[in-house]
Image (cartoon, grey):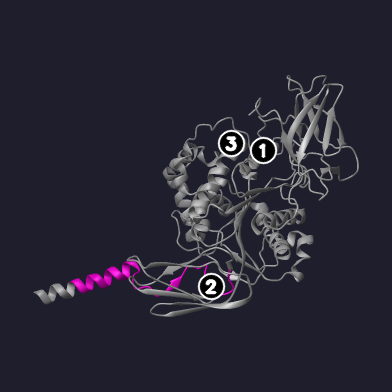
Amino acid sequence: MKKNILITTLLFLILFQITTGYTQELKPSTLFCDNMVLQQGMDVPVWGTSKPNEKITVKFANQSKSTITGSDGKWMVELAPLSVSKTGREMSITGSSEIILSDILVGEVWICSGQSNMQFSVKAVPEIESLVPFAKNIRSFEVKRIVSFKEEDNVIGNWSTTLPSSAVAFGFAYFLEAIGDVPVGIIHASWGSSSIEAWMPRDMTKELPYFKTIMDAFDKDITTHNNIQKSLDAKNGWTRNEDIFMRRQPNILYNAMIKPLAPYACRGLVWYQGERNTRYLSGVPEVTEKNWFHNVIGMKEYGTVLKLWIERYRKEWHNDNMHFSIVMLPGYGKGTAANPDIDSKSPTAASWAWMRESQLKALDLPNTSVANTIDLGDEKNIHPTDKFPLAQRLALQAAKYTLNKKVVTEGPMFDTIEINDNTLIVHFKNSKGLKTINKKAPTGFWIADNSLKWEMANAKIEGETVLLNTIKVKKPLYIRYAFAGKPDVNLVNDANLPAYQFRTDIQIIN
């Protein structure tokens, strides 16, 4: 009898191990493979799975770190901060078996994420493609575009000596490598027409009621779930419509494409997204099971959500210093007036200015930067090809704020306003060598009195200030600069970096 019980118990334990995956062999996370780049100057977590209660040892760069796997077979060690290395080296991971990873560099690691303008290919931008033959010490991890209903432990992809496919990501890496003289590793995770909600973890529903409403409606939408699963199960890939449908869902891009990346040591994240959220909302409308699909947050509310999103990602990476570089949306649409139609339902209207204002709210947080693109873009094309100067600006900001390089990274930013009779005097930060790029009078300035009837201003540079007036406004009080969809602007500093959009009527219209 006891013998039968013992046999039954042993069989149960074997079955339990098989069904729970405890018989699995040693495996690091898919992020740890040949050709990877590890982050310099900070603790570097290395993790994976193996058998329960097994000793795992990771050796790299004269370091040896050991741990014991948990009852779930998971393990993690932390390497002490590493120095830059342009020479590929090996990492060994040992348990009951041994894994050798080769050609590992140490430098700067950045995640590049967002929607279609981040996905926009190198081949579509001749200026950036021309840099390819001169690239060195740049590696990439292309995250497979996939979704998941649950938070995944592993991301699909691998490190490669192949350059990043994204024009912005590659251009950024190219200039950062040149300025910093360090290897650069890019983890590229983007998907066209995705909203910020697609990249949000489910637990953000606790602080964002509108997101909870969206997720509740999504959970009840059995048809959508079945359609997504059908696409995931398809053996011959997805149709274009299926692709678009999946990438426009909330949360499930985060689950599959971002969650498994944490806490891979990285310097920061470049975020080029916002087009999908560029529409006007006055508060958040009621979300129902029929309309939840379209109710992403609008451009005037986007800034608040963006800041919460940044803070939540930092928690996931256990890194309050993780830098977030936000790409301001470039010029697009026909709007040129200072008073954009904020009730317009068309993203081509001048109302894109409101989204840029929201994106600039990221600067309320430490360790953030916003790459100004107010002078770039295409009136008729939401996917402009002038990515070259954008890549340069992103690299300059990364070099200054994360590598402590003494470089000029931003153009003039509004500081204070002085009223002198019928003239407004604008003072700027970063205004050394204030000038216009075409040597003409500054353009893009509008002024108004208490009526908020905006009139184009006559503008004149005086030292490091701009003087504004017009006979149409006798007692001017407020200013709007570049507050349009595709503004006509020419104001720069001595580094030829453009002035940032601003308005001074924030307390009046918010």
Residue 427 part of the magenta-drawn span = no
Q: Is residue 37 above or below residue 203?
A: below
Which badge, 1 or 2, is on the more N-terminal residue?
2
Spatial distance from mark 3 to mark 1, Cα to Cα? Answer: 10 Å
Q: Which mark is residue 301?
A: 3
Magenta span of residues: 9-37
Of callouts 3 and 1, which one flags the residue occurring earlier in the amino acid sequence? 3
Reading the image, the residue beneath label 1 is 357
Are there few (<14), some (14-19), or many (20+) residues within 10 Å of tag 2?
some
Q: Earlier in the sequence, mark 3 or mark 2?
A: 2
Inspect the image, locate mark 2, and give the three-letter code of the amino acid beneath it.
Cys
Residue 203: x, y in percent?
44, 46
Mark seen at residue 33? 2
* 66 w.r.t. 261: above or below: below
- Disc 3 marks a residue whose amino acid type is Glu
Label tally:
3
Q: In this picture, is 374 found above or below 110?
A: above
Q: Position of residue 38 (x, y in %)?
A: 57, 68
